[in-house]
Image: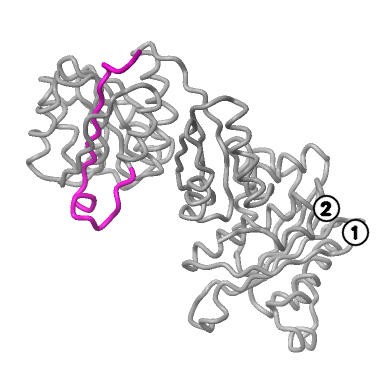
Amino acid sequence: MFKNITASVIAIGSELSSGKIQDKHGKYTSSILSDMGFRVDSIVLIPDNENIPFFIETRKDKIDLLIVTGGLGPTSDDITRSVIANASGVDLILNNDIWSDLQKRFPGIMNDSRKKQAYIPDGFTVIDNFCGTAPGFSGYIGNTLVFCLPGPPSEMQDMFERSVVPSIIKKFNLPKPEIKNITCFLICESSLENACRDYNSKEITWGTRVQSYRISLYLQGGTKEGRLQFFAYLQKYFGKELIVADDRTAEEILVSSLKRAGKTISLAESVTGGLIGKLITDIPGSSSILWGSLVTYSNKAKQEVLGLKKDFIIANGVVSKEAVEEMTSRVMLLADSDISLSVSGYAGGSHDLDEDTGNIWIAVKNRNSKVFSKNFKFSGSRDLIRRKTAVAAMLLAESSLVWPERLDSYDQWQYS
């Protein structure tokens, strides 16, 4: 029915065209557009240079839909705005709403470069950026509908799903695609893609969006029952705690369960340095469930704040089953909370041995049950190890509340 609706994707960025960074924009957008009924006739990678207008002009009036990503930043080589304005025969106009928002978000660092992001081709519609600074915009170049999106994948993909897809559906009178949204924790993208590929569904297509603390996966096509079977397969493969329905964060899952149960939680953080508490308090209303987070990073803090004995630390070490279980029990006594959670480990640094990096212990205690602890071996950068630790800790805490009988099965987690 939609075979004659054509689309093209242009990804702008010298790092993409040179091969320094693998392009994900073309694969991501073209897969969704194809499932919606478009015939994607080209995916083009262009460096930030004077050749951009040529590629824009070659598609003008020849295709129905053009997706352009990149080149919307504040630097001198970000020329997408002016290229689109020239191609459509209009001027760039300062959008006062965007400029006012930028001034509020970045007080004291406003300059002409930053102000550049507030200029939009006259007559084009602004697309809000909920994950970054540069807004997108849409409009027509001749008879071709154009959407210009920022280059960073997290910003582009959020904008594409949140704003572009609904707009395309409306403008081209397309049926709304039936999509199963899934959130994946502690699983690397390659492992997830291999599992999806092994399922070998001929009717269902899938795509991923890598985010800071999780991967968002969508299943599209086939029947509702077929998508649910695909989802069930992934849960069985990786574990129900790591594959959950809808687009949710670990802290949203934990806070929601605590509120529903009317319970409170206390934290003793070492390796994460307060990250878990930060993520929880990012959620409005979290004060009703969070007693607080004690960032007992040094051995001295563990002794003076939590009350761990020096001889105990010498005998067991601070990155051990015994240490995190004691930390968890101690913070529960201090807070009189329903659940307590503690983390300790090595994220990598000047004092960590290479073989220690990624060695993490997490312990969680429910008021009327024994302490449960689990050892993880995470890989990646210092920042990534800390993020994985925070996510794993919150998932364990949520499980101790909702289904504590399943905690022992976590040794079978297929995380990476």
Which-is-in-front pick, marks 2 and 1?
A: 2
Q: How many labels does the image show?
A: 2
Other-residue count near label 1 (Cα within 10 Å), few / some / many at <14 / 14–19 / ≥20: few
Label drawn at residue 5? none
36 lies left or right of 212: left
311 lies left or right of 123: right
Which residue carries the number 2 mark? 404
The quadrant of the rendering that contains the C terminus is bottom right
The quadrant of the rendering that contains the N terminus is top left
Q: Is residue 18 magenta?
A: yes
Which residue carries the number 1 mark? 369
**In the depicted structure, whether residue 107 falls above or below residue 58:** below
Mark 2: amino acid: Pro
The residue located at (40%, 37%) in the rendering is 157
Label 1 near label 2: C-beta < 8 Å?
yes
Where is residue 149 drawn, in percent x and y?
30, 34
Task: Specify the quadrant of the image occupied by residue 116.
Answer: top left
Q: Residue furthest right?
A: 368
The residue located at (57%, 72%) in the rendering is 358
Say which element carries label 2: helix
Say which element carries label 1: loop
Q: Give the range drawn in magenta.
A: 1-24
